[in-house]
Image (spheres, rainbow, N blue to C red):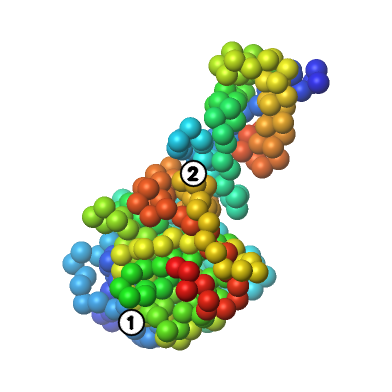
Amino acid sequence: MENHLSRTVARNREAAHRKVEGQTIIILPRLEEVVVLNETGAAIWELSDGERTAEQVADEIARLFDVPIDTARSDVRDLYDDLIATGVAQTAT
Amino acid sequence: MERVLGNPTRTCVVVARLGYEFVTDLPDVHQAILDHFSDSLSDRRDDAALTTTISRGEIGFDPDAGAVTVSASGSVVTATANDAFTATIDLSRRSGELVVGVDHLRIGVENYLRIANAIMVLERGGVQLHSAGVIRDGYGFTFFGPADSGKTTSAGFSVDHHILSDDQNVLLPVDGGVTLCGVPFRSVACPPSAAPGQAPLLRLLRLIQDQTNYLEPVGRVSGIAMLASQCSFVNHLPDFTDQLLANCEEIVKRVPVEALHFTRSADFWKII
């Protein structure tokens, strides 16, 4: 858990995105699939600038969506695993 | 590179309302264009969207070489396909240079045109969609999905109607609606009756093979994602993906995507 919270993740610079009805559609060129994120997922993705740590992103998510910090941490961890697996984001440190 | 002295021939192929002028001094290349695009030729050349000079080079064809490779840098797009051709398209100058392999004139020219048109229709707010297109009673139906989802199958079960293509079609927002435009890009298994045409798009159907036939609504966001994922070439180019998503959103706003669960028979026509 500690490793997960100290890591920084950056959006893939090649990814194009568009917000529609509160959700975000992401196209990563060279991927077959297009990724759709819900509002929370989109916020996490947008906060993933390669500078903020996962802990800082989770803090911000907890504040923005008024959810317990443990829930936010879990959301960030799970989404980061998915985003990195698909190539939409990558570990910066 | 082979060159033949003499006056180059000029041929215009119209694809989804866009004129593509080909200039070549090679008689067999000219003839290959006339033969392959016989149902899409036009005399209009003064307003060509893209003028392309074709030459022929010693490019071997390797069927194991993989898919088409396309990249973009600024306004210049470069493409190669299975070593059948190499090409450069300068969008700012509306010009292209195409070198086709000796034994693959048709493949080279068609693949080049597929890529060029996928890019050019984006500028007009449209998309070139990996899909089957059919006109029934004056209205357009588009069946789309990834490989093996049933595009050629659905076209095959539509021989009583006007089949446009089983592989690629263009969707253009026009006058508050969307126009389905056939393009001369088809698979080898496409019913031979397929021919160009266009019609107001009535249904935008994501194919899902199933045990029964039924329609299922698809949310707008999912619909946009489904469309964008099936717009070949341009969804692989970072310079074009913003425009692609914007165009898909506009199209889906006008004609929502529906999921068509269908059996391998013509019965699906009864529910659409």
Would you name the residue on which mark 1 appears? B39
Q: Quadrant of residue B36?
A: bottom left
Could you tell me which residue is drawn at 28 percent across and 66 percent down? B17
Judge depth for marks 1 and 2 and give the one in front: 2
- Where the C terminus of chain B falls, by quadrant? bottom left
Return the chain for callout 2: B
Q: Quadrant of residue A12?
A: top right
Q: Is residue B170 visible?
A: yes
Could you tell me which residue is drawn at 37 percent across and 74 percent down? B135
Horizontal relation, residue B181 to residue A5: left or right: left
Q: Percent position (x, y) of residue B38?
A: 34, 83
Q: Is residue A2 above or below residue B130?
A: above
Label 1: which secondary element = helix
User: Mark 1: which amino acid?
Assistant: Asp
Bin the neighbour count of mark 2 within 10 Å (Cα to Cα): few under 14, some 14-19, many 20 and up: many
Horizontal relation, residue B64 to residue B262: left or right: right
Could you tell me which residue is drawn at 69 percent across and 37 percent down? A82
Label 2: which secondary element = helix
Cα–Cα gap, marks 1 and 2 = 37 Å
Return the chain for callout 1: B
Q: Percent position (x, y) of residue B176?
A: 26, 52
Earlier along the polypeptide chain: callout 1 or callout 2? 1
Could you tell me which residue is drawn at 66 percent across and 36 percent down? A83
B166 vs A71, nearest the viewer? A71
Q: Percent position (x, y) of residue B169?
A: 41, 66
Would you name the residue on which mark 2 appears? B221
Q: Percent position (x, y) of residue A22?
A: 48, 32
Q: Is residue B252 above or below residue B79?
A: above
